[in-house]
Amino acid sequence: MKTRIYYHFKKSIKGRIKYMKQMEDYFTYKELYKQTEYKLLFRLPLTTLMLWLINLPTNILNYFYYLKDRRDYERAVVDVEIMRKYIDEEDKKEKLNRLKQEYSELIDEVTPYLAKSNKHLHKDNNDKYH
């Protein structure tokens, strides 16, 4: 029987994968934005540098937010790996328990036949040598 955390992890993985896809889109947008800024720097160097200097404190703060977003993304990736590992281990345990149960049922069915055939063989062997 699976625990509640197993199902919670399954649901959480779906949510984190959705978050990771959104963050990948965000990072792609940020890269495109950087390319735009570089092109503007070459087309309008004086204006772009002046705006960059005026907005330097805000740009530094935005860079820290970007670093935090990167870390959160990487944490989500690690979380998904750990949860998937837990889910796989639980699935393996359940499969192993099911196989053990099927095997024990098979043994229970076959044991009476084996006992009969062993008694018969054992009796014949004793008669031969005594």
Image: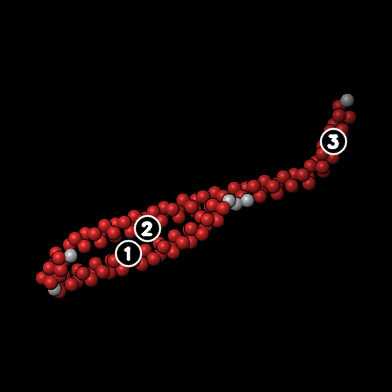
User: Could you tell which of marks 1 and 3 lies nearer the N-terminus?
Assistant: 1
Place residue 75 in its image quadrant. Answer: bottom left
Q: CA distance from mark 1 to mark 3?
A: 75 Å
Image coords of residue 49 (percent x, y): 13, 67
Q: Regarding mark 3 in the picture, which secondary structure is present there?
A: helix
User: Could you tell which of marks 1 and 2 lies nearer the N-terminus?
Assistant: 1
Image coords of residue 113 (percent x, y): 82, 43
Which residue type does callout 1 highlight?
Phe
Q: CA distance from mark 1 to mark 2?
A: 10 Å
- The residue pinned by badge 2 equals 73
Q: Regarding mark 1 in the picture, which secondary structure is present there?
A: helix
Q: Residue shown at 24%/67% (left/top)?
A: 34
Is residue 21 something that shows in the picture? yes
Q: Does the residue at mark 1 contact the one at mark 3 (Cβ under 8 Å)?
A: no
Q: Quadrant of the C terminus?
A: top right
- The residue pinned by badge 3 equals 119
Q: Does the residue at mark 1 contact the one at mark 2 (Cβ under 8 Å)?
A: yes
Judge whether 110 appears above or below 6 on screen.
above
Which residue type does callout 3 highlight?
Lys
- The residue pinned by badge 1 equals 27
Q: Regarding mark 2 in the picture, which secondary structure is present there?
A: helix
Is residue 88 something that shows in the picture? no
Count of marks overlaid on the render: 3
Q: Residue shown at 15%/74% (left/top)?
A: 43
Residue found at the far bottom of this picture = 43
User: Could you tell which of marks 3 and 2 lies nearer the N-terminus?
Assistant: 2
* Side (left or right) of 124 relative to 73: right
Between disc 3 and disc 2, the foreground one is 2
